[in-house]
Image: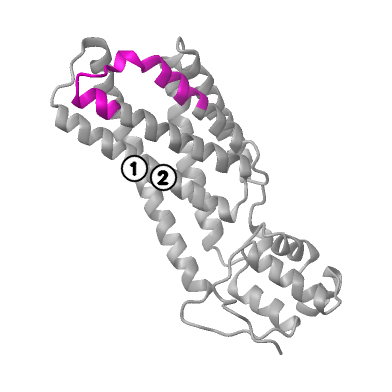
Amino acid sequence: MVKPKNIITMRQPELGRKISELRKAKGLTQEELVEKCNLNVRTIQRIEAGEVTPRSYTVKTLFEALDFQWEEVKNGPENHQKTYLFYLYLAFAAGLLYFFLAFYEIGMEYEWIEDGYVGNRKSFTAIKLLTFLSYVGFLSGLLYLERYFPNRLLKVALWVMIGFNVVLYSLDMVALNSTILDIQDYYWIKLEAFGLAYAFLGASYLAFKNVKYGLAQVIGALGLIAGILIFSGVGVLFGLLPLTFFEIGQLGLMIYFIQKIGRPSSPDSLLVA
């Protein structure tokens, strides 16, 4: 029996590669390994490809079938999973906070653009900063979920959205707290940038497969429509409705994915992009 090195904390895709190497070293096909551990071929394929993160019990079964020593430790996969889920719930809470703050921020920004009235600049600055941090926290949670449910297009779209938020909220901070810049100087650029980012983000959700009731496709279509309307400039107000449902849909999809991760089921039940 071979003693593993830090095998308990190994993550995908490294775990899948390790299982594949062990199987090939023993001269086994995936079908032959299936017979030894009572899993199905599709499960083995997904694990080796790094598309799903198997439960502790499944990994243990595979290692035993491959004569690879399994060591139980305090910080094993199940405990790591609890930590991951806690982080994801925090990201969901951040998304929920952003959803409500955004309405308040949009109203204040409308007054700023139309009337040049900001009110208490310190309060508005604090609202914008909190809105930015909560949204980036939520997007970071979606990025983390991408590890479990691979979607490269979504990963790129999320980084683009984070980048646009960093740049544009920084400009807002300068415009709010100095006289060297005014929101009117870059407002249309801001609209087009966010419109493009939302359209890209919406399109990326269309790449998900096997989500119940076509939820990812509906969310993706809403984001795409909202992004196009906002990007056009003339349809900004019309874009707020699909954008609102898009944000609600993202929150719902995050909960759906979190439940998938926490559910005591086989890797076959996990979504694959």
Q: Please provide percent x and percent y for residue 119.
A: 14, 22
The quadrant in which the N terminus is found is bottom right
Q: As drawn, is 227 to the left or to the right of 21? A: left
Q: Please provide percent x and percent y for residue 22.
A: 75, 76
According to the image, label 1 marks what residue?
A: 134
Q: Are marks 2 and 1 in contact (CB under 8 Å)?
A: yes
Q: As drawn, is 251 to the left or to the right of 37? A: left
On screen, 241 above or below 85? above
How many angstroms separate mark 2 from mark 1 (CA)?
Answer: 6 Å
Magenta highlight on residue 176: yes
The residue under the point 51% across, 76% down is 76
Q: Residue furthest left?
A: 120
On screen, 72 above or below 199? below
Q: Residue furthest front?
A: 180
Q: Which residues are magenta?
A: 172-196
Q: Nearer the viewer, residue 214 or 145?
A: 145
Q: As drawn, is 51 to the left or to the right of 191? A: right
On screen, 81 above or below 144? below
Label number found at residue 247: none
